[in-house]
Image (cartoon, rainbow, N blue to C red):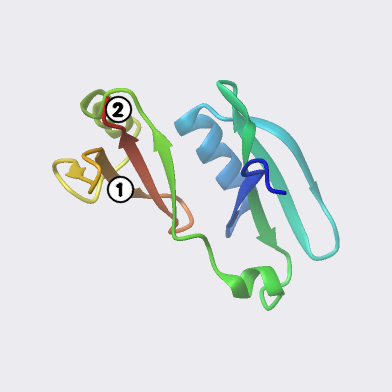
Amino acid sequence: MIKKIEHTAIIVKNLEESIHYYTTIFGMSLRTKGDNKQRSMAFLYFETDPAHEIELIEDLQPEAEYAAAGIVNHLAFTVENMEEAVRFYEGKGIEFHTDKPNVAIDGAKTSFFTGPNGELLQLVEPVR
């Protein structure tokens, strides 16, 4: 039976640039990195949530099955204060898709932006 989400995999164009982005912008840590004949991969995590990883995958063969599958729709990160988080990430060069956060159907504040590979990323401030 399923116990938890193990990881979220994202297809990237350049593994090294993507590792740099996620570790520099979000403060994630690199758990492991390696490759085989088809692809290069890296697993990253937050120190505050080491059980959930993101896997960055660069297909070494553009026509390979992983590259053909596309990227995930979006990856969402929890923040405590949306306004502070937006200011912080704007200071790191992030451009958000809207001037103000949106309100989700559950009342959470959300803001979307685009990562270095065209992946859709989201900040979420849950309702308290």
**Based on the displayed image, in which of its 4 quarters is residue 126 positioned?**
top left
Q: Is residue 84 above or below residue 44?
A: above
* Residue type, mark 2 in image: Ala
Q: Is residue 87 left or right of residue 72?
A: left
Residue reaching furthest left? Answer: 99
Q: Is residue 44 left or right of residue 40?
A: left
Q: Who's the residue at 66% across and 73% down the image?
A: 62
Measured from the top left, where is residue 18 in percent x and y? 56, 46
Measured from the top left, where is residue 102 in percent x and y? 18, 45
Q: Disc 2 marks which residue? A: 85
What is the crowding at mark 2: few (fewer than 14 residues within 10 Å), some, or many (at least 20)? some
Closer to the camera in the image, 105 or 1: 1
Q: Who's the residue at 51% across and 26% down the image?
A: 27
- Using the image, tell me which numbered label, if any, was put on residue 112: 1
**Based on the displayed image, in which of its 4 quarters is residue 94 positioned?**
top left
Measured from the top left, where is residue 52 in percent x and y? 61, 36
Q: Is residue 35 left or right of residue 45?
A: right
Quadrant into which the C terminus falls: top left
Q: Is residue 117 left or right of residue 29?
A: left
* Disc 2 secondary structure class: helix
Q: Is residue 80 above or below residue 16?
A: above
**Based on the displayed image, in which of its 4 quarters is residue 125 positioned?**
top left
Closer to the camera in the image, 3 or 55: 3
What is the crowding at mark 1: few (fewer than 14 residues within 10 Å), some, or many (at least 20)? some
Measured from the top left, where is residue 90 in percent x and y? 27, 34
- Using the image, tell me which numbered label, if any, was put on residue 125: none
Residue reaching furthest bottom? Answer: 63
Question: Distance from label 2 to label 1 (Cα)?
Answer: 12 Å
Q: Who's the residue at 53% across and 63% down the image?
A: 71
* Disc 1 secondary structure class: strand
Q: Is residue 93 visible?
A: no
